[in-house]
Amino acid sequence: MGPGVTDTLLYVYAVTDADLVDAEVDGLSAVDDAPVHVIAEAAVAAVVSAVDAQRFDALALKRSLEDLQWLEGVARAHDAVVSRLASHRPVAPVRLATVFTSTENVRTLLRTRARDFTAALDRVRGRCEWAVKGFVITGHTAPATSAPAPGLSPGRSYLERRRAERDHRAQNQHEALTEAAALHDQLAQLAIASRQYPPQDRTLSGHRDEMVLNVAYLLPNGEESEFRQVVDAYQGRHLRLQLAGPWAPYSFAILEGDQ
Amino acid sequence: MSAGGLPVPGRARPPEHRQESTNLADILERVLDKGIVIAGDIRVNLLDIELLTIKIRLLVASVDKAREMGIDWWEHDPTLSSGQRDLADENRRLRERIGALEATRGDENQGRRPLEGEKNDGTRRD
């Protein structure tokens, strides 16, 4: 792991119970394809890998994070390690780009905050996160305004047509929002906890339709079938729905006092 | 708000435990905005970073930030959501443009009756 070597830093992915052993993290694809290691201390363990100090010191990081392609590589590697662990043990994911200069500093962190980390792990023990996104379905029933009323000037009939389209879209959106709220109510009753995310911006998400629902739900492991049925029941009426999971419990393994 | 060049084409890694392929936006909103916050030895404030503030924050904005941005449908009447405001704005701009067009065409503007429903709409300008 080379903690004594000055040209590497330690990137921390997640915190978990102290019974994690190196064999469990063998072969995980980490940032820069470096091997993943375990640092156990007190009742908890940190999952780390060595990263190049040239590229992960504060200045370099600040620059690199501007590079969306670089960011994507790190984010996907980060998530790959976290989700692999989360598939078989409680995990508290650490925010992206948390970097330490030595193993000893990581140990100190684990020792001093062991109780907080354990509490965060207890919140998600035996549970996982499912994500539901809803998009407004547009244009499935075009307003019947194709024939302009006789006697209107071209400008007026254009205006009338645009008005009808506007009203139709507004109505559509209203129904989608109402449906989204009803769906969320039902899903929240099945979940242990839920957290709303802001709708993703279209340019970033790559989705064409407007997102009106973006929520993470905490469910007991393997108990998503009823949840899935509710989503299916709402599918395609006014909303196009996406159910994704299981995610590592990013939205719920939080420290006391954070959000 | 410009987000030129986005989204970046994903490097197609096979999804590990999720059935659906995971898009970058979904991962970023979790790894950048969620997860436990630990002060590492290398201090980087993710929110200081220009790209994050301009582009990523659109996506991973905290709920408070979302409220400031008017994305708050879950707390208010759905008809007041930002999308509706966009439509109203678009509609107003459109009407202004049509008004200008008709004026230049010399159509009988003075005889123009309000359109149905227009009297209920406080945003009329002409």
Image (tube, helix red, strand yellow):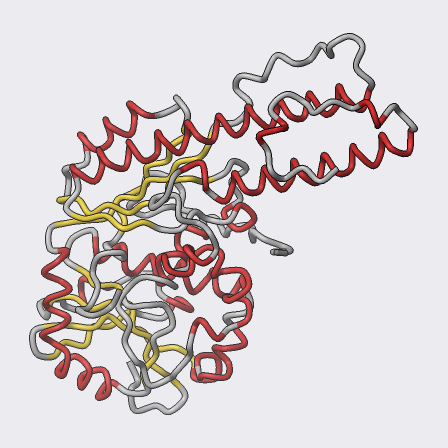
**Left or right of A160, for residue A139:** left
The mark total stands at 0
Seen at 15% across and 64% down, the residue is A120
From this view, report whether residue A59 is shown above or below residue A44.
below
**Left or right of A113, for residue A51:** right
Closer-to-camera residue (B107/B33): B107
Please identify the quadrant where the C terminus of chain A is shown. Answer: bottom left
**Left or right of A145, for residue A119:** left
Closer-to-camera residue (B71/A49): B71
From this view, report whether residue B14 is shown above or below residue B66.
above
Seen at 30% across and 60% down, the residue is A81
Q: Quadrant of residue A144?
A: top right
**x then y, percent, for residue A195:** 27, 51
Q: Residue furthest front?
A: B110
**x then y, percent, for residue A149:** 73, 10
From this view, report whether residue A123 is shown above or below residue A256.
above
Seen at 32% across and 45% down, the residue is A215
**x then y, percent, for residue A151:** 80, 10
Closer-to-camera residue (A88/B96): B96
